[in-house]
C-alpha cells in the first residue's frame, strides 16, 4: 500500500509541470513525458500526442470517480474462490471497459492457475511502457507481472521514488520468495485505455530475499 501511495504522489507531482515543456514526440516509452496541469494532460490524451505511459499517469492523477458507472459491486474483501465467475472479480468498471477488463482477468487467472505460493523468482525490474510493469522470472523462464497489484513489499525497496522509478541495484537480478494473493486493486484498464477500474488482481503480499552467495 505504501508503494502505491508513493507512486500516486509521484504522478501528481509530474502533472504540475508546465505543458510547454512537454515534448511532442518521445520514442522512449519507458519514460514519462512531463505534463502540466490536469486539463492540459486531458487535452493531450483526447488529442494526438499523449503516449501510453503519460496517459496512464494522468488518468490516475485525475482520480476519476467510478461512481455511477459501475458494472458490478460484490465480493468486496472476500477471498477469491474457484467457484467465482469472471464478473465476481470485478468491483467497479466503466461499462465500455468491461469487455477488455474481463479478457485481462481471464488471462491473469490462466497465468496464475496452479502457481506455487510463494513463487521463487528473480526480480527483473520495473518499467513503464504501455502500463506499469513489476516483473519477476522463475527458473523456467516464466514471468509474473505485478504492475496492477495492490502490492506490499514490506521493508524491501525494489525501486526508487524518483522521476523514472529507477530500479534498486541492491535487489535487481536477485532471487526472492514472492508471496502473493488475489487482492482488490485500482488500476488503469486496458488494451491501451486508461480508465480506472477496481478488481481483484494478483498482488504481492510479502517479499523475502533468498539468502545466497549471489544475493549478498
Image: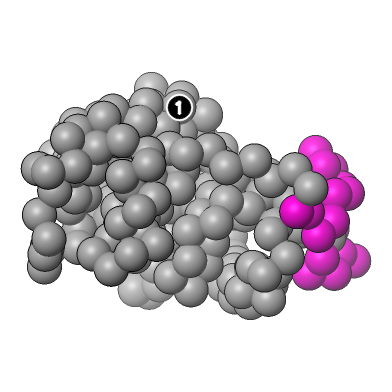
Q: Residue at (85%, 49%) from the top-left corner? A: 73
Q: Is residue 108 above or below residue 145?
A: below
How is colour applied across the structure in the image?
Answer: one colour
Work out whether residue 203 or residue 92 is closer to the camera in this orientation and state it: 92
- Residue 213 place in picture, x, y as percent: 18, 42
Work out whether residue 191 or residue 140 is closer to the camera in this orientation and state it: 191
Question: Label 1's element?
Answer: helix
Magenta-highlighted residues = 69-87
Asked if one can make out residue 57 in the rendered structure from this viewpoint, the answer is: no
- Residue 137 place in picture, x, y as percent: 35, 63
The residue that disc 1 covers is 5
Work out whether residue 119 or residue 201 is closer to the camera in this orientation and state it: 201
Magenta stretch prevailing secondary structure? loop
- Residue 30 place in picture, x, y as percent: 20, 58
Q: Residue at (48%, 59%) from the top-left corner? A: 194
The C terminus is located in which quarter? Answer: top left
Q: Is residue 104 above or below residue 153?
A: below
Bin the neighbour count of mark 1 within 10 Å (Cα to Cα): few under 14, some 14-19, many 20 and up. Answer: few
Write down the quadrant of residue 78 in the picture. Answer: top right
Q: Residue at (88%, 49%) from the top-left corner? A: 74
Q: Residue at (35%, 53%) from the top-left corner? A: 43
Q: Count the marks: how many? A: 1
Task: Inspect the magenta stretch and tell me whether residue 105 lies in it.
Answer: no
Task: Inspect the magenta stretch and tell me whether residue 84 lies in it.
Answer: yes
Q: Is residue 50 left or right of residue 177?
A: left
Asked if one can make out residue 78 in the rendered structure from this viewpoint, the answer is: yes
Amino acid at each position: 500500500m505504501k508503494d502505491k501511495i508513493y507512486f500516486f504522489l509521484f504522478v501528481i507531482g509530474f502533472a504540475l509541470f508546465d505543458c510547454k515543456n512537454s515534448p511532442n514526440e518521445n520514442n522512449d516509452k519507458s519514460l514519462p513525458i512531463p505534463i502540466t496541469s490536469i486539463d492540459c494532460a486531458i487535452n493531450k490524451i483526447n488529442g494526438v500526442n499523449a503516449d501510453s505511459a503519460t496517459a496512464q499517469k494522468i488518468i490516475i492523477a485525475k482520480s476519476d470517480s467510478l461512481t455511477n458507472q459501475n458494472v458490478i459491486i460484490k465480493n468486496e474483501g472476500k477471498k477469491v474462490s474457484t467457484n467465482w465467475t469472471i464478473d465476481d472479480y470485478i468491483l467497479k468498471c466503466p461499462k465500455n471497459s468491461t469487455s477488455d477488463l474481463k479478457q485481462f482477468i481471464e488471462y491473469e487467472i490462466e497465468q496464475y492457475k496452479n502457481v506455487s505460493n510463494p513463487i521463487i523468482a528473480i526480480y527483473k525490474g520495473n518499467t513503464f511502457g504501455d502500463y506499469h510493469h513489476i516483473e519477476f522470472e522463475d527458473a523456467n523462464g516464466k514471468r509474473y507481472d505485478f504492475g496492477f497489484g495492490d502490492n506490499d513489499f514490506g521493508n524491501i525497496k525494489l525501486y526508487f521514488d524518483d522521476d523514472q522509478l529507477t530500479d534498486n541495484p541492491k535487489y535487481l537480478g536477485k532471487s526472492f520468495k514472492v508471496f502473493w494473493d488475489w487482492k482488490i486493486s485500482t488500476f488503469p484498464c486496458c488494451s491501451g485505455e486508461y480508465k480506472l477500474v477496481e478488481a481483484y488482481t494478483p498482488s504481492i503480499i510479502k517479499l523475502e530475499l533468498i539468502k545466497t552467495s549471489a544475493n549478498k
